[in-house]
Image (cartoon, rainbow, N blue to C red):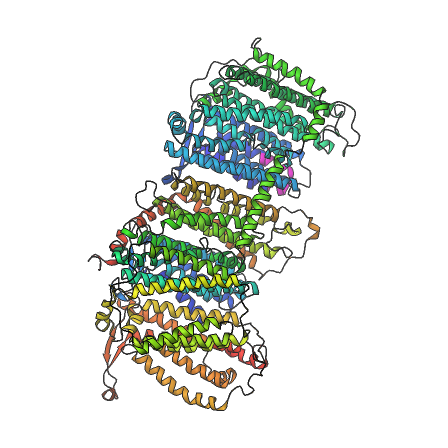
Amino acid sequence: MNAHLAIAPILAPFLAGVLLLALRDLPMPLRRWFALCALLAQVGIAIMLLAAVAGGEILVYRLGNWPAPWGIVLVADRLAAWMVLITTLLALVALIHASDGTDRKGRHFHVLFQMQLFGLTGAFLTGDLFNLFVFFEILLISSYGLMLHGGGAARTRAGLHYVVLNLLGSTVFLFAAGLIYASLGSLNMADLAAKAASVAPENLGLARAGGLLLLAVFALKAALLPLHLWLPATYANTSAPVAALFAIMTKVGAYAILRTSTLVFGDGAGALAGLFEPWLLPAALATLVVGMLGALAATSLGRLAAWLVVSSVGTLLIAFALAQPGGVGTVNAAGIAAGLYYLPHGTFAAALLFLLAEALRRRRPASADAFASDADVARYALWGGVFFVAAVAAAGLPPLSGFVGKFLILQAAAGQPWVWAVILVSALAGVIALARAGSRLFFSATSADAAAPPLPLNEPSSATRELVAIGGLLGLIFALTLGAGPVVEFTRVTALQLADPAAYIAAVLGTEGVAR
Amino acid sequence: MNLLLAVLTPFLGAALVALAARRGRALAAWSAGAVAALALLLLLPAMAASFGGVTTIQRLPWIPTAGLDLAFRLDGLGLLFALLILGIGLLVILYAHYYLSLEDSLGRLYAYLLLFMGSMLGVVLSENLIQLLVFWELTSLSSFLLIAYWRRREAARRGARMALVLTGGGGLALLAGFLLLGEIVGSYELTSVLASGDILRAHPLYMPTLLLVLLGAFTKSAQFPFHFWLPHAMAAPTPVSAYLHSATMVKAGVFLLARLFPALSGTPEWTWLVGGVGLATLLVGAVIALFKHDLKGLLAYSTISHLGLITALFGIGTPLAAVAGVFHIINHAIFKAGLFMAAGIIDHECGTRDMRRISGLWKAMPHTATLAMVSAAAMAGVPLANGFLSKEMFFAEVVTASGKLPFGWLLPVLVTVAGVFAVAYSLRFIHDVFFGNEPTDLPRTPHEPPRWMKVPVEILVVLCLLVGIFPAQTVAPLLTVAAAAVLQGPLPEHNLALWHGVNPALWMSMIALAGGVLLYFGRKPLFTLHDRVEGRLDARAIFERLLEDALLRTARRFTAAVDTGSLQRQAALFIVSALVLGGSGLLLAPSPLSGTRALLPVDGVSLMAALALVFATLAATALHRQRLTALILIGAVGLVVALVFVKFSAPDLALTQLSVEVVTIILLLLALYFLPQETPAEPSASRRWRDGAIALVAGSGATMLAWAVMTRPVDSIAGWFLENSVTGGGGTNVVNVILVDFRGFDTFGEITVLAIAALGIFALLENLRLPAPTHDAQGRVWDADLHPLIMATFARLLLPLALLVSAFILLRGHNLPGGGFIAGLITAVALIMQYLANGVAWTHTRLPAQTHPLIAAGLLLALLTGAASWLFGRPFLTSAFGHAGLPWIGHWIGEFELASAMAFDLGVYLVVVGASLLILINLGLAHRASTPVGARVKEARN
């Protein structure tokens, strides 16, 4: 099994998805149990993978037993394993929440869900640029299916925008891959890294254009300014568990930016080193600001959560884009480490807010998740407490992991007062937005007599599943906080591994040397 | 780990108390009291040690790599504050039990109070600065909950938000300040920071550090100009005001000044900033307090003024001033908490806090009146009460400091003016409330409160007097250790006594007392003046205008202007971004656009094909509003592209392109059937020009890139594939070997995409009911003969042939043009023909094979083929091939090749057939779903 550990996270959801498709006539409870067991197995696999690479080993899986750079390789390093673990944990929570009846509202929810995971894990593990394109397609098409799940006019409209924009993105990806192949002669990322330094001067323009077009595609996926507009509409209009799962989707873009900027366009890339650098930090800072403005302008919790996803992408990419303090090289390992700690936090906190918005929609027949006071406040008094914790997490206030993440990012950004100012002022804007939201939602101005009758629950046990899902996310955030010591240590060594890609390149291309 | 436990106790206790409150109010109060007492008990050993000058430091690792540990510290200053927090906390718990009405949830109040207590303990007992900040922000959060305790009241909600925004925002500045401190010192530990005063003061970043730290301290301690949140926080229940907004939380700011005194003080910047702000706050607070009609409003501004006094003392910066500052922290906490509680009793008994309505309460509640008077005397700085002593020290320090400054004489004058106002408002508090005519229109009839409600006030009043009369015997030891901890060095000579002889400070006190009395009795003209100016400069209005109007409106306008939900805009933004990025990449590099390859001669056929391509593209653009025409033209583009593939010897690509083209066009035609025949026109000419310009630039960019790529020789890994196709992959068709073997994993992914797309479309269309049009755009009726006989007959004849061809193409694929993808498309086209010619229902009854199992089987086959290599210890998708002959008939067909990749290709085939059919059938059925035929077919659809 260990020999195939690097591919297991990809094939497990694929197998589960295909079996769920074949067994589509089984009663729903059985399919749910099957999906849940499959996901638990995937969490187990992700943990095993993380354990296998935590010591710094890089697992290379040569598909079809073809040598790199000709065949496709999967590469599991610390970063890939970390992303896979975060994804499966988030998916587990989303799946439990979806099992409360959301999955009945359309066809093939569980198949699409597993295929989405297939795409996500594949994107994190592949070591080949074109294969990354393929997994982006899988991601896109299954997320489109999931996004539309349950139907409705607003959802279909937002879905159309989502898919059209992303197909444009795919087209540009093909341009980028073509240019990079034409100029560097390879698609294997380690091979590209090895060849980047010695790119012929007459091909430099093509390579740069290809790299920057890649950045455009990844920025679209990550919802980086000015390509962020698809996100609020998409996330706010889909069902809650899907929105929760989508919290990791923007991180795929961020991951791809991080991977290419450290591996292919890292410090060893000669004339191509730091290709993204002039663009990334300004765009990330602007994204954070605009995301917070959107959060301030939001009039419902779902939209607020969606805009906070935008701003958390901004924060994350600020961390990844931070310049080296001493000016030596372009990769700031401390910033990357801080970002990699902040990444799961931002993901879980956003998912938590999406699930909370749904909890309110179910209990407030009159005003749903809009920021209006509601006479039914007594019925969801408990949720006020949950919201408070979620808001503290989302705003990055102490003592939860969001604060730790922001603290680490600020620490890594020492000597860059602009970055500090933007992060801190945005944090204040986040506090304002969330405090307004909370006091409008939970501090009622109307009396309890006017309460409307409660909505019927999806299924008799749905409240329990909802609680388990939300409790799970809270638990993950608490675990990140309490376990910050080991987690930060892990992200620190992960960042060091990224900052020095020599081991990665050697592992992929083998010891016999770099192919020319 | 006593310190950690003591800090955690209130947090854990909060949950416990919330539970206990369900069993009655008394139990809630007792359990809350027990929690506070337990925390005190846990601190006792360290407290005792601190009296011996021992600083207890305990630590637990948290995030060692970031310099963040859980580190706690109890020294004299921590001891003093811990005593205040827990001692006054206990009194407030007792008081709140009687204060809160039966409708209000006592458990919730206690739980929040304990959360605050734990946070505040954390602030004063932190050794690590970042950890201090964590607790600092927690006090802001818990105070938000406490101020908003009466959630239905608008004032409470606004007050809570304002406090959170200001103190929370200040906390963020403080975070930046602490980070800078850590950068400079190299550690976040207080022990190191306090020892690094000289390094800090000499560092170029001293000024920003100081400003950021002070921003945090000033917002928290309600210093001018951030003072205005405190009066609005008075919307909280009075026990909360007594606890947070007089004794503890607002002291966090001055605590921080005291804590960092050795590290940051001693520079002109410190003196001017801290001293100046403190002095301004002292004056502003004292003046405004006099004019407040609300009892709690008066106390709030008086608190602001006293906090200013303490700040000013630390600003003066001499050791003796710091001692006086610490002393006033103690005294103010004692008398102000008592005053708030007294105000709460009056409010509780009268039903109002408006001093214009309350008067002559002396008769109704003489006991309370006495208590209030002693506390008010302390507030005014009347001898024998504790406030007098520290105020005298303040006056003395001001006089000393004034000698070193230009215009120094102004200082004692201003300070005395503040003293005059302090006496006046204290007098007003007492005289307006307890003396004068008996009240007439109070909501309730006042009488003495329950016995135990007065006990906390009595304790505080006794302390007031004890400290005031016997300072050396009571407070001196505590003050000594606390001040020593502030200074981190030897204490200056100081004398805690009632009588220091006749000196300038005494004169200032006298003037303040006499002036205050005069001011109070001659206040009428001042009040008229104040009523005229009031409202002109309302800090809250400014704050809300800034926040609500400026910030929120900007946010709303900006977001509404940018986020219009227009797909065109988003697409334009993306394309322009790609252009800018790609363009900068290409043009900013010193590379030539054209490569070195010689250009091929242009032949007639290619020229014609290119012209046809250009013409079809232009025509499709020009006619894009007529959807059917545009679709046909796009089909023409696709065909020319297929021909180009043929010309450049890529038969596989040509075959694929052709069959994809056919299937796509049929699907698009089906979709167009439900859509309007014409696309609506673009709204404006400027928009068309914009889009046209973007399209032109994008097209030119793509052309340039294509030109650049095609004119240069490619040095790539492609050669290896040609060399290894037969030997390694067992096939002579390199394209197919790449697809199913070298890069089989890509294909594995792509067939999954196809399968998911089909499932997604199925899910989308399943319940879709679309009205089928009966007429076309020109008003002609759709053909009555839906399934012409000739087409039906030919389609049926064609089916077996087409299937045979597809089987042939599937099998030869590994060595000659063909393969699973093309074969699947051919099969799909043949089957689609049946549907088109005979109708979906007819075909369905004769073709019972379902499409879902087909897709599942295809994917599973691909997966199993890939996984089979595991049995041989090889990675996923490792291929094997060999040659075999069949028994019996072998000598007719000879030996043939078997490759595992062919099974994989069969999986591809199955998925392609299943997915195309699934999409097609469901699109075709979309308008029939509501008809009876549709209902029958629906059963068969999945």
**For residue B59, which quarter of the picture?**
top left
Q: Is residue B169 left or right of residue B719?
A: right
Q: Quadrant of residue B438?
A: top right
Question: Is A327 above or below relative to B129?
Answer: below
Q: Nearer the viewer, residue B8 or B886?
A: B886
Image x and y of residue B567, in percent: 50, 62
Residues B308 and B602: in front is B602
Taking the magenta stretch, the answer to whether it contains residue B26 is: yes
- Which residue is pictured at 39% across the width and 34% down the height? B182
Depth check, front residue: B295 or B552: B552
Residue A292 visible here: yes
Residue shown at the point (47%, 88%) measured from the top left: B792
Point 46% across, 48% down: residue = A286
Place of residue B376 in the rendered image (x, y in percent of width and height, measured from the top left):
65, 22
Instruction: Look at the image and tell me whether residue B909 can be seen.
Output: no
**Residue reaching furthest to the top:** B501
Residue A1 percent across, percent down from the top left: 31, 61
Does B674 sit left or right of B827 as displayed? right
- The N terminus of chain B, quarter of image: top left
Image location of residue B829, percent across then percent down: 42, 81
* Magenta span main SS: helix
> Residue B632, relative to residue B444: is it above or below?
below
Q: Verify whether residue A212 appears in magenta.
A: no
Question: How many callouts does the rendering have?
Answer: 0
In the rendered view, does B803 fall on the left or right side of B509?
left
Q: Which residues are magenta?
A: B19-32
| Pick the front one: A16 or B706 | B706
Q: Residue furthest left?
A: A512
Specify the farthest residue to the right: B440
